[in-house]
Image (cartoon, grey):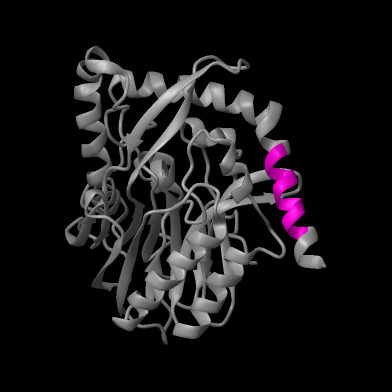
Amino acid sequence: MQTPSNNFSEYPASTNNAPRRIKAAAIQLDAAAGDVATNLYRIEALVNEAAATGARLIALPEFFTSRIMFDARVHEAVLPAQGNPALALLRQLAGRHQCWIGGSMLVSERDEIFNRYYFAEPDGTCHGHDKDLPTMWEGSFYQEGQDDGVFETKLGGVGAAVCWELIRTQTVRRLLGRVGVAMTGTHWWSTPSNWGPIMNKGFAAAGQYNRYLSECAPAEFARRLGVPVIQASHCGSFHSGFQLLPGLSWEIPFQAHFVGATQIVDSTGHVLAQRYTHEGPGLVTADIELGAREPILPLQDRFWIPELPLLLRTVWNQQNACAKSYYRGKGRALGVAAASAISKESAQ
């Protein structure tokens, strides 16, 4: 696998023999928790469907091998960096359909776990980006990455951004002027629906704004980066645990659903195609122009691109603290062990 360079040399928006116009597809997935085989079966069917429409640039969701909630089943979805069946499928699909395809999964390497976005080319070349910061309980299952997420490909510079990376200014800074298209995937959930009428009322404004952020993130990202954005999403509802304090096993039930939309957005932020999460699994397609233009909006000097309400920032920090403690105490070891078992099984 080729990993992105950490120097900030400028990559071309396209190569001389690469198509300037390409048909893109983004997939919306209803994934099972911890059941990698089932999810790969669903992904293969949707990719085949996308390729049948003529799509040659295909985005899969973040965590396409398993939805991620605070649930022990998620550990079973951690895959080894070598002998990885999901990565093998990406390569097979890219070769079969002569397309470029990307999505993220939990990967164990060097006794740590990362949320790694893989981008496979038709010739079998594969690039990787590890998400910079876990979001809330996701950090129970992986740690932060360090690379810049820029891939030098036959299409030119391709950037990877995963879920809440789309709403952080540091993501735009690492990609700006270096890519001609952004491949993104999300795993964006709602506020809880099972905490009673008083809490529902208290969360109402934050929940509405959270949905607005998820739906607008690809377009706002494109307006600041100046390239097309292809975003794939999850759909469906789920139950999770919600950790209360770092280092303690206290948790309460959390029932929610995925929000946002699977979208293809042009370099001006205009939505070319979209499928809302409540519409269920499926895909969208649209023709895009590869290459960068002058961004419509400037990048402000702050951490978040949008203004995040105090409640969302508080929960983000509280859940990150709980998750990091769990990962260090239990999550890392369980995930590494699961990936090691897969490696041993594939070696036999």
- Number of numbered discs on residues: 0
- Residue at 45 percent across and 56 percent down: it is 160
Quadrant in which the N terminus is drawn: bottom right
Query: Measured from the top left, where is residue 24 in percent x and y?
Result: 31, 72
Residue in the picture at 39% in, 56% down: 184
Looking at this rendering, what residue extends furthest in the bottom direction? 17
Asked if the magenta segment contains residue 221, the reply would be no
Can you tell which quarter of the image residue 168 is in?
top left
Does 14 sit left or right of 130 as displayed? left
Question: Vertically, is 37 above or below 321?
Answer: below
Residue 301 higher or lower than 260, as above or below: above
Which quadrant holds residue 322? Answer: top right
Q: Position of residue 178 (x, y in %)?
A: 43, 61
The one nearer the camera, 244 or 168, is 244
Could you tell whether 67 is left or right of 343 in the image? left
Residue 112 at least partly seen: yes
Left or right: where does residue 63 sit relative to residue 220? right
Q: Position of residue 44 (x, y in %)?
A: 46, 71
- The residues colored magenta run 334-343
Residue 336 magenta: yes
Q: Is residue 176 visible?
A: no
